[in-house]
Amino acid sequence: MDHVTPKCIRDMTKISQAKKNEVKALLSQKRSIREVAKTVRISKTQVHAIGKQFGIHSKKTAGRPKSLNTHDVTYMVTQLVTQKVKTARSLAHTMSTEKQKPISRFTISRELKNAGLKCTTMKKKPMISEKNRKERLAFAKAHKDWTVADWKRVIFSDETKINRFGSDGRRWTWFRDGESLKRGNVKQTVKGGGGSLMLWGCITCKGVGYLADIEGIMDRHLYQKILEGELVDTIDYYEIDETKMIFQQDNDPKHTAKSVKAYLNEQEFKVLSWPSQSPDLNPIENCWSHLKSKIYSFEKPATGLKELWERIEEEWEKISKDTNDYIEKLYESMPRRMEAVIKAKGLWTDY
């Protein structure tokens, strides 16, 4: 069979050296094949072949050109970061009305992810008023120079509720299509939630304190009994010097009742003035989360509140013994918590 020279090669012989040099110069300037072909008035195939001759390889971009340029992406990121808009859907509307660029929210989401942003569910945090924000900031600034040793003088306290059937959050399971559900595939519930326990607890730098099972409604009288009982027992157990100790409690009305204040004023220890809406500053909240994760990880829920209390007591004691200096690390985090509040100007932190 006779060798046939491709048409594009044959056409190359008709192009002058001057035009080839012009093509070479334009391609060296990173001009596109389409642009060079239009300027020199030859075909794109010929431009590509000339570039290949001179060892210049032009990038070919597949598909249609991008709908959004760098300025558009910067504008979108700014809109979200400054919270002028809060969702990709509302940003799509803004781009359409203000920039005359009708872009889908899916394209916007992809571009935002490429720009380093990520979308996640909103974290639940307590409402912080302007008054609360100022109090939190003032507290953090007043204690920013406290060392870990200073914080170790503090006994932190709080109340919490633990459900018998765990939290109401989502849980996921896998099973074969067409198979009937087994016990392990469902989260069993009971009418009324199966009951729960309200607890008061405290922690010291040496370990967890005594827990109180709160029966009925917690009022100032019951709270004072807890202070006289579980708190005093904790102080005695760890042989804490009350003259050097500081007690922390939040600003719940029953904690600040006149009778409770009178009792606390009679004690040798000091009471730490605490800003409202500040669970992120209290390390016992981390202990509650740790305790609940252990209780809710049991394969079978407690058969009743008595068994639930037994599990709680057992897992609570383990926090001091089996968690690799867990309490120690919480106390060591206190200076960082103060820094975080100052950095956030009194608003929420990641603690």
Image (cartoon, helix red, strand yellow):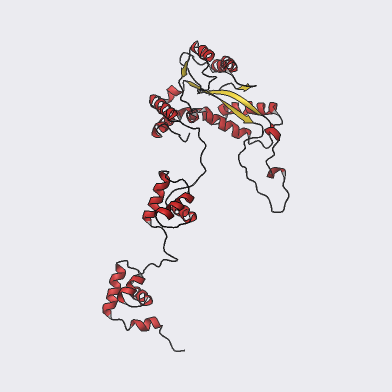
x and y percentages locating residue 71 in the rendered image: 36, 54
- Residue 320 is situated, as x and y percent measured from the top left of the image, at 56, 26
Residue 258 higher or lower than 143, as above or below: above
Q: In front: 86, or 110?
A: 86
With 222 as the anchor, is 335 left or right in this view? left
> Residue 79 location in percent, x, y?
41, 47
Kindly indicate the quadrant of the structure image that contains residue 139: top left
Identify the residue at the far left of this view.
18
Q: Residue at x 38, y 57 (%)?
A: 69
Q: Look at 69% across and 27% down and name the residue there.
A: 305
In the figure, 98 relative to 327: above or below?
Answer: below
Which image quarter: residue 332? top left
Q: Is residue 166 visible?
A: yes
Residue occupying the far right of the picture: 180
Is 13 left or right of 303, judged from the image as shown?
A: left
Which residue lies at the image location 31% right of the left edge and 70% below the top edge? Answer: 27
Does residue 161 lie above or below 238 as drawn?
Answer: below
Is 276 placed left or right of 211 in the picture? Answer: left
How far across and how far down the image is residue 149, in percent?
Answer: 43, 23
